[in-house]
């Protein structure tokens, strides 16, 4: 009887972490719901305080160019905000304005 109880306890403690990992967090559930039914391949990765990690559709290889464009668009929007210019403003960017790397 004691042997059986020990075996069941060991199995329970081995399976406990798997049960916790299998549960979706509320944020993960909301993100999945937000992209559900969209005609796009959407991948999301969230790292909170360097510890909590949520990944959705992490098994798909995505081109990085969209990631770079997003950051550039944010930087441009911030610049235009500080210059008090509407987003529809056209900007002239000369070759001399660009950095080589």
Image (cartoon, rainbow, N blue to C red):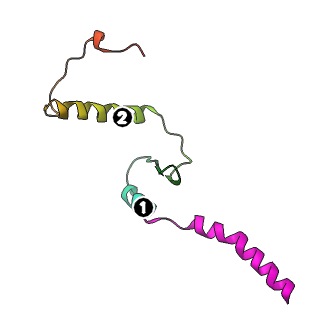
Q: Which mark is residue 86?
A: none
Residue 32 falls within the magenta-colored stretch: no
Main structural element of the magenta stretch: helix, strand or loop?
A: helix
Q: Kindly state the secondary structure of the residue where label 1 is placed.
A: helix
- Image location of residue 20, percent across then percent down: 59, 68
Which residue appears at 41% of the width and 58% of the height?
31
In-image side of 85 versus 58 (left or right): left
User: Badge 2 is on which residue?
Assistant: 71
Which residue appears at 40% of the width and 35% of the height?
66
User: Badge 1 is on which residue?
Assistant: 27
Compared to 10, does 40 lie above or below?
A: above
In-image side of 3 versus 19 (left or right): right
Q: Which residues are magenta?
A: 1-26
- Image location of residue 63, percent across then percent down: 48, 34
Compared to 27, does 49 lie above or below?
A: above
Of the 4 image quadrants, the one containing the N terminus is bottom right
> Which picture quadrant has residue 73?
top left
In-image side of 38 versus 23 (left or right): left
Q: Residue furthest top?
A: 96
Q: Which class describes the residues within 10 Å of circle 2: few (<14), some (14-19), or many (20+)?
A: few
- Image location of residue 27, percent across then percent down: 42, 61
Q: Kindly state the secondary structure of the residue where label 2 is placed.
A: helix
> Which picture quadrant has residue 14?
bottom right
Which residue appears at 43% of the width and 16% of the height?
101
- Image location of residue 80, percent across then percent down: 19, 31
Which residue appears at 36% of the width and 15% of the height?
99
């Amino acid at each position: 009887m004691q042997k059986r109880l020990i075996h069941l306890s060991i199995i329970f403690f081995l399976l406990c972490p798997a049960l916790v990992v299998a549960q979706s967090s509320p944020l993960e559930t909301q993100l999945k719901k937000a992209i559900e039914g969209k005609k796009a391949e959407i991948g999301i990765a969230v790292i909170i305080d360097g510890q909590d990690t949520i990944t959705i559709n992490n098994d798909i290889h995505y081109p990085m160019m969209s990631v770079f464009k997003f950051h550039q668009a944010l930087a441009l929007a911030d610049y235009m905000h500080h210059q008090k210019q509407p987003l529809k403003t056209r900007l002239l960017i000369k070759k001399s304005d660009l950095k080589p790397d």
